[in-house]
Amino acid sequence: MCLAIPGKILEIQEAGPLRSARVQFGGIVRQVSLDFVPEAGLGDYVVVHVGFAISRIDASEAERTYQLLEEMGALEAELPPAE
Amino acid sequence: MPAKTIVELSCPAPLTAKDTILLGHGSGGKLSAELIRDIFLPAFQNPVLARLDDQAIVNVNGQRLAITTDSFVVKPLFFPGGDIGSLAVHGTVNDLAMGGATPLFLSAAFIIEEGFSMDDLRRVVSSLRQAAAEAGVQVVTGDTKVVEKGKGDGLFINTTGIGIVPEGIELSADRARPGDKVLLSGPIGDHGIAILAQREGLEFETKIQSDSAALHTLVAAMLGVTSNVTLDIRCMRDPTRGGVSSTLNEIAERSQVGIELEERSLPIHEEVRGACELLGLDPLYVANEGKLIAIVAPEGADAVLQAMKRHPLGAEAVVIGTVKKENPGLVTMRTPLGTTRIVDMLAGDQLPRIC
Amino acid sequence: MKYLDEYRDHRIARALAAEIVQRTTRPWVLMEICGGQTHTIMRYGIDELLPRDIELVHGPGCPVCVTPLETVDKAIALALQPDVILVSYGDMLRVPGSRSDLFRAKAQGADVRIAYSPTEAVKIARLNPDRKVVFLAIGFETTAPANAMAAWQARREGLTNFSMLVSHVLVPPAIRALMVSQTNRVQGFIAPGHVCTVMGCKEYEDLVRDFRIPIVVGGFEPVDILEAVLMLVRQLEAGEARMENQYVRSVSYQGNLPAQKIVAEVFEIAHQKWRGIGLIPQSGLRLREEYAAFDASRVFDLGELTVAEPAECISAQILQGLKKPTDCPAFGIRCTPENPLGAPMVSSEGACAAYYHYRRHRVAS
């Protein structure tokens, strides 16, 4: 359920209590509400569902966990292909 | 499938797509195919029509004439990279070109809604004229109808095209053979996404332009390099409504072969990817208006690919798959993980989704 | 695209799959809750990479599939009222009601519009003061904050022509219902990463404690799912039952607090019917009393609708992971995406549709 994809904050707009941003997804940019991610700032990646950012991606945590996966992948690449 | 007793359906009867016309019947997917099979083919049954190619090829006093017709209903009428006028030329010219025909003459019929802006009509006509001039075709006849306000969506255009098929060219969707290569002339989905970006409620910013273009010079370049056209290039199609997937499914079905695509080889612009990820769409089903797919015998594939790359409209051409004996009638795809999945034909249009 | 492409890396996927093969010594039945995860599994053929001993069964996490038939019928009835504009997410348009679907209603002249975001529905209401705008607000916890925001915004603006037909379901009560069922086979869950992005992990810790079953909060890309499977296998093989978070780049322990706050302000927990499954206590959300004026089920008098599912549809068993779509005698024959008997054949993340679109060639043999 719940298609949500990461995009990068390019520009932040504040209108009274509401906060929104232009967020880039690959080659397109869409207006996204930042109401639920007050901590998100310019350049951050946010996970977006139906036009609302629902989380700010923790870049260092993502980096750390991906590093472990990447090492596994590099090991696998050295082995001859399966089957 | 395990053998089980078939349970009788209870009331309410399941919905069927047979009681009324839905938008999906015009989507180029399965519902369109059903409509043609159940309503139109039985009514007009004849051998030329039965070929179900993008154009009919008829013999008139020894001359092979290609005829095709297409109606254009696009919203918005003006979009990045074109408008309904240029589209009405490109669409029909391409349907002729896919049969190997040299396009010569067009008709243009305008169905205009009462109250439509005269300026907009001038713009459309001027664009149509320019596109026809660039494609080297003449608009030789036409028609105008005006419908009451509310009975049309601004403007619809129908164009019919006539061309000549040179001797020795025999392109048809039933000619694909195992071992043939599947060539694609460039990145997919540009037209569909350029249109979608303009749609009310979905607006997003993108630099993407419709790929709308007349492909007959590309086709001529491809036909020019093959030693034996009839043996080398089996068929050509432009993957418009329903996208690459629908076109390949039709070829697989008509030729009773399997087609296997390599997912990693599919060229897709970052704009199209971004929009598809965001809205949950598959670029394989998104419309193109300036791309072609060619099924080419393995011996001729490289020469044809190089000829495409030398042409500006085929600069990014690639081999995207192979025709197989296995799974006749089905299109499959090797995923980046090395597994295989089906690339099905959709029932109707793809819709943006949240889940 | 950053944070997507890396998690589709074939080398990492193969490495994870190899590790899973190595770690698995016995048969295990795992359930991915979310239809989005089912979709990824089918689209990328992840089950083909797994050892035979690992059986993935597909959960009820498809909001479109579990939206009650009555709600679909009500939406169609509302859409057919001449002064109503019905706004819906694209997913709902082909979902079969008892006699029709929203697409067919549109063909009969109903004003049905697709929105990507609930704020569009509010905008349509603002721009059409002489029409009644009804938003079909469906979803799981992930979508609840955005839908709540639409009601909140409409109330703040004092819109009198906007209402929502709400069908919101909650994941943890559904897992509970599956676990207490006599027929349950599931030995480990992949919890839905985007639901947990909003709600956090606490509720899943409670489930682990109450049922001693491992739960891993997982993401949606192939690498995410394979890693979540590996984490479950490690626990199961070691005889452990813990809550683990694979989707750390988006999910925190406490979840998204501002989002939870708006949901609590606008909605309250209520009993909820799940299509194909039945009533699950305390498993849904409805609008609070303060928002009664925005509740389409109160604003419009729709009466009681009698509804019935085609008897042949086995979606109940499919949504509970008891059967696979290919176990259904109607699959691909009398039930196809063009002529669906049940909702799981419609939604792109419904298990039946995922099998149909990506796997028919395996089934046909």
Image (spheres, coloured by chain):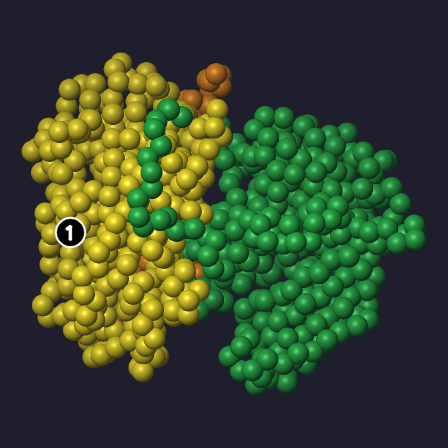
Residue at the disc numbered 1: C272
Vertical arrangement, residue A25 with respect to residue C229, above or below: below
Colour in which chain B is shown?
green
Q: Colour of chain A?
A: orange
Q: Amino acid at mark 1?
A: Gln
Q: Is residue C320 left or right of residue B127?
A: left
Examine the rendered structure and indicate whether residue B132 appears above or below residue B3: below
Residue C188 in the figure: left or right of residue C281: right
Q: Chain of mark 1?
A: C
Residue beneath the point at 24% across and 57% down: C71
Residue C345 image point, x, y percent: 37, 43
Which structural element holds mark 1? Answer: strand
B195 versus B178 height, above or below: below
On the rendered structure, is C307 left or right of C105? left
Looking at the rendering, which quadrant does residue B168 occupy? top right
Q: Is residue C72 above or below residue C113?
A: above
